[in-house]
Image (spheres, rainbow, N blue to C red):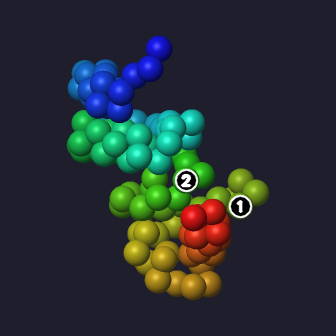
């Protein structure tokens, strides 16, 4: 069965509109989706849970760029914790290096 992106987003929004928790944990929630659908779902989730604390676990770095804070882990240890803008403005941060590597990978493919 093929589901359009709008139908998928509407379904997610309906499901999320009845949340009762103050904390939402998303563990690679959109990893299997194409980038366009991922962005649409992320926007829907952010709107539906605007008043909640969200913990997002993601390998797609653009997924966390809208977060208030980013925590970078290495071997189970916190190595960085700051706002996306601070981490991206520091060219010696691990998050900066990961983001630059991801951007280079995209540029090579494109």
Can residue 19 be seen here? The reply is: no
Q: Is residue 14 above or below residue 61?
A: above
Residue 20 position, x and y percent, is 28, 24
Residue 42 position, x and y percent, is 37, 44
Near-viewer residue (65 or 50): 65
Q: Residue furthest top?
A: 1
Please tell me which residue is depicted at 51% across the width and 38% down the height of the picture: 33
Q: Which residue is mark 2?
A: 60
Q: Is residue 79 left or right of residue 83?
A: right
Nearer to us of marks 1 and 2 is 2
Q: How many residues crowd mark 1 within 10 Å: few (<14), some (14–19), many (20+)?
A: few
Q: Residue furthest front?
A: 110
Q: Is residue 99 above or below residue 20?
A: below
Residue 72 position, x and y percent, is 59, 62
Q: Which residue is mark 1?
A: 74
Please tell me which residue is depicted at 47% across the width and 83% down the height of the picture: 89
Q: How many residues crowd mark 2 within 10 Å: few (<14), some (14–19), many (20+)?
A: some
Q: Is residue 35 above or below residue 67?
A: above
Pick the quarter of the image with the C terminus.
bottom right
């Amino acid at each position: 069965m093929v589901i359009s992106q709008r139908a998928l987003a509407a379904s997610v929004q309906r499901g999320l509109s009845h949340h009762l928790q103050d904390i939402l944990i998303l563990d690679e929630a959109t990893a299997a989706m194409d980038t366009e659908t991922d962005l649409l779902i992320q926007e829907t989730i952010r709107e539906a849970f605007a008043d909640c604390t969200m913990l997002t676990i993601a390998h797609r770095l653009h997924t966390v760029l809208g977060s208030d804070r980013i925590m970078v882990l290495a071997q189970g240890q916190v190595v960085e914790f700051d706002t996306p803008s601070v981490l991206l403005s520091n060219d010696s941060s691990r998050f900066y290096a990961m983001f630059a590597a991801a951007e280079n990978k995209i540029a090579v493919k494109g």
